[in-house]
Image: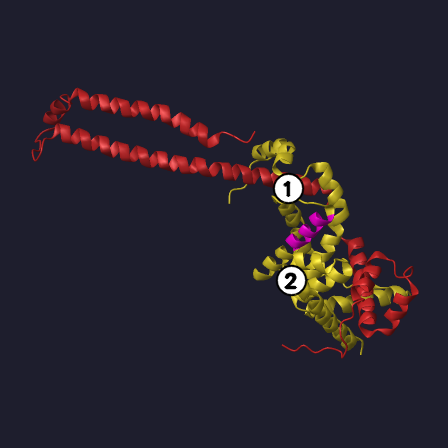
């Protein structure tokens, strides 16, 4: 594909002010929404992919798709759930593509000061969790994160993951048991 | 697929326990729910994992290297404009292709018509001079029709370009 010239870029930059017509929210509304949601979405993407760099890329893509979506949102919660749905689909698409060099999330516990036993213990628990999560099936990871880290209701999880609300409870129960078993195995 | 469980069933209070962990209201919740969470295996497991996952999320959020909102907005607008320009270019390219094909077809048709008027059925010409003398004798009706076609092209082409590039939304 042809690279854009500087003059084309400057023309595009000048036209950027007209973006409100293209996007389904204005810049101020976007800033507010982004400040509230960017970090939880990045955390979700990072835990689902296990790769910080991919989380960075997918974050930008998720917000772009949200801005371009022709959906109308009744509430901010609805918009946030839609953003998580986009993020979930992006992660699923990414899994279908061939792998590139991953930048794994850092294992902070290895660098933790042993004198600070609380911090080291906390970091070690996070590493255990990270490794156990990586061994779960993608859908189990998504379910557990949305339910327990994000605090989404069963209805919201069903909408985000394109599942039936009635099946969430059982799926979540099984996923939770698998994670608990893995964590116990690591401890023992 | 193995569906091994730890020997206990889901509890109807699991969701409430998870909500309390996420919303930070576990300490302030009523004693009955806290007592239940301590006695129910499903709820105890939910409580333990919800705390672990929620703490992990808080830590990840704290260390998340997210770009600024302005930067994300700017990149999105640039990309949207580039995509809009590409999309707008598609009909122009298509139109140019159609125009080129039409021009070639018209040229071939005109050459054919001219050839038939110059060279009657089955009769060839032996010299170039002969050909030129015959071409001078093209009928006025054919010349008029050629002029009309050319005039139509001159009128239609700008209209077609205008329709392809006009922004009807604004």
Q: Is residue A120 above or below residue B94?
A: below
Residue A175 occupies which quadrant of the picture? Answer: bottom right
Chain letter of the residue carrying label 1 = B
Q: CA distance from mark 1 to mark 2?
A: 33 Å
Query: Which chain can be seen in red?
Result: B
Answer few, some or many: residues within 10 Å of disc 1's Cα (few below 14, many 20 plus, some between 14 and 19): many
Chain letter of the residue carrying label 2 = A
Residue marked by disc 1: B76
Colour setup of the view: by chain
| Chain A colour as displayed | yellow
Instruction: Pick the quarter of the image with the C terminus of chain B.
Output: top right
At 68% across and 64% down in the image, what residue appears? A166
Front residue of this view, candidates A69 and A78:
A78
Answer few, some or many: residues within 10 Å of disc 2's Cα (few below 14, many 20 plus, some between 14 and 19): few
Residue A79 in the image, given as x and y percentages of width and height:
69, 47
Residue B75 occupies which quadrant of the picture? Answer: top right
Residue B6 in the image, given as x and y percentages of width and height:
76, 78
Instruction: Pick the quarter of the image with the N terminus of chain B.
Output: bottom right
Residue marked by disc 2: A164
């Amino acid at each position: 594909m042809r690279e854009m010239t500087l003059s084309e870029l400057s023309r595009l930059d000048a036209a950027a002010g007209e973006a409100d017509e293209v996007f389904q929210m204005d810049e101020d509304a976007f800033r507010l929404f982004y400040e509230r949601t960017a970090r939880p979405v990045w955390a979700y993407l990072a835990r689902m992919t296990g790769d910080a760099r991919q989380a960075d890329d997918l974050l930008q893509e998720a917000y772009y798709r949200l801005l371009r979506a022709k959906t109308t949102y009744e509430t901010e919660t609805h918009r946030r759930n839609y953003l998580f749905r986009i993020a979930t689909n992006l992660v699923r698409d990414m899994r279908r593509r061939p792998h590139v060099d991953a930048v794994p999330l850092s294992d902070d516990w290895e660098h933790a000061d042993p004198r600070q036993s609380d911090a080291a213990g906390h970091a070690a628990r996070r590493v255990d969790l990270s490794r156990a999560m990586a061994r779960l099936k993608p859908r189990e990871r998504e379910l557990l994160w949305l339910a327990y880290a994000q605090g989404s209701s069963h209805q919201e999880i069903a909408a985000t993951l394109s599942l039936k609300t009635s099946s969430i409870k059982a799926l979540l129960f099984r996923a939770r048991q698998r994670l608990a078993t893995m964590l116990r195995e690591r401890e023992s | 697929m193995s569906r091994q469980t730890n020997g206990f069933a889901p509890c109807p209070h699991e969701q409430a326990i998870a909500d309390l962990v996420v919303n930070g209201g576990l300490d302030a919740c009523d004693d009955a729910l806290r007592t239940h969470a301590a006695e129910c295996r499903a709820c105890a497991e939910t409580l333990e994992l919800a705390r672990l996952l929620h703490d992990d999320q808080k830590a990840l959020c704290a260390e998340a290297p997210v770009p600024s909102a302005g930067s994300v907005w700017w990149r999105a607008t640039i990309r949207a404009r580039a995509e809009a320009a590409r999309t707008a270019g598609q009909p122009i390219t298509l139109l140019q292709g159609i125009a080129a094909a039409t021009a070639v077809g018209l040229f071939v048709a005109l050459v054919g018509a001219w050839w038939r008027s110059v060279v009657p059925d089955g009769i060839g010409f032996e010299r170039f001079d002969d050909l030129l003398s015959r071409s001078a004798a093209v009928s006025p009706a054919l010349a008029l029709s050629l002029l009309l076609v050319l005039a139509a092209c001159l009128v239609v082409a700008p209209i077609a370009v205008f329709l392809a590039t006009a922004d009807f939304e604004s």
